[in-house]
Image (cartoon, grey):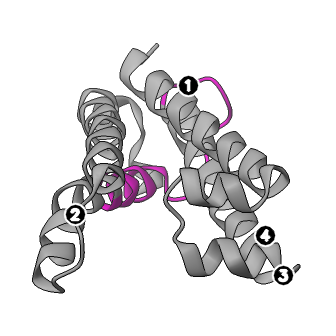
């Protein structure tokens, strides 16, 4: 049992559920969770775009949770498991270290959301990366 991947899967599942809650929470929730004023205003006008985008993110995060649980051996092995776990780890880690510098280069405000969200996804990425590394021999060559 790989506790790192279980933790990563639980974190991704929680993030997926949080994104679904944001849809139902409406514009104030979009603002609070850092989606941006334009996105919040679009939701306030009744546009389906914010909900569709947010539901899409929730779906991706749910799939990522499934990959972590698969790598931990909690569910059947998913296709391209090794590759999937490496890519998920890389995306989380890249998001963690690139977001703030990109904002700074674009001369945008680096506010609290940028800092805490980067720290959060750094934790997610580390859980996936360490979990993938420790589970690697057990993931099977058929999943390359």
Instruction: Tell me which numbered mark, 2 or 3, is placed earlier along the sequence.
Output: 3
- Provide residue 32's location: percent of width, then percent of height: 56, 51
Residue at 48%, 50% in the rendered image:
81
Disc number placed over residue 73 in the picture, else none: 1
Number of other residues with Cα within 10 Å of mark 1, as a class: few under 14, some 14 to 19, many 20 or more: some
Q: Residues within 10 Å of mark 4 (few under 14, many from 20)?
A: many
First in sequence: mark 4 vs mark 1: 4
Q: Dot 3: what SS?
A: loop
Residue of label 4 = 51
Between marks 4 and 1, how big is the CA–CA gap? 33 Å
Residue 86 point in image, percent of width and height: 32, 54
Task: Left or right? Give the position of 107 relative to 27.
Answer: left
Residue at horizontal 47%, vertical 52%? 142
The reply to whether dot 4 and dot 1 touch (C-beta < 8 Å) is: no
Expressed as whole percent of the image width and height from the top left, the position of residue 116 reads 31, 43
- CA separation, marks 1 and 2? 39 Å
Image quadrant containing the C terminus: bottom left
* Location of residue 109 (image quadrant): bottom left
- Disc nearer the start of the sequence (3/4): 3
Which residue lies under the disc numbered 3?
A: 45
| Mark 2 vs mark 3, CA separation in Å | 27 Å
Q: Which residues are magenta?
A: 72-91
Q: Secondary structure at mark 1?
A: loop
Label 3 CA crowd tier, 10 Å (few <14, some 14–19, many 20+): few
| Image coordinates for residue 13, horizontal then vertical, percent | 63, 37
Do we see residue 125 in this rendering? yes
The image quarter containing residue 31 is bottom right
Q: Secondary structure at mark 4?
A: helix
Residue in the image at 45% along x and 57% along y = 84
Mark 1 → mark 3, Cα distance in angstroms:
44 Å
* Dots 2, 4 in contact, CB < 8 A: no
């Amino acid at each position: 049992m790989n506790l790192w991947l279980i933790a990563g899967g639980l974190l991704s599942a929680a993030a997926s559920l949080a994104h679904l809650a944001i849809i139902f929470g409406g514009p104030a929730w979009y603002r609070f969770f850092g989606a941006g004023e334009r996105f919040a205003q679009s939701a306030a006008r009744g546009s389906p775009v914010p909900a569709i985008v947010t539901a899409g993110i929730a779906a991706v995060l749910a799939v990522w949770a499934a990959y972590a649980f698969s790598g931990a051996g909690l569910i059947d092995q998913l296709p391209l498991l090794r590759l999937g776990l490496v890519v998920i780890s890389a995306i989380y880690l890249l998001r963690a270290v690139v977001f703030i510098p990109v904002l700074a280069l674009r001369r945008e405000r680096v506010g609290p959301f940028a800092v805490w969200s980067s720290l959060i996804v750094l934790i997610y990425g580390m859980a996936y990366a360490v979990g993938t590394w420790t589970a690697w021999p057990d993931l099977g060559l058929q999943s390359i």
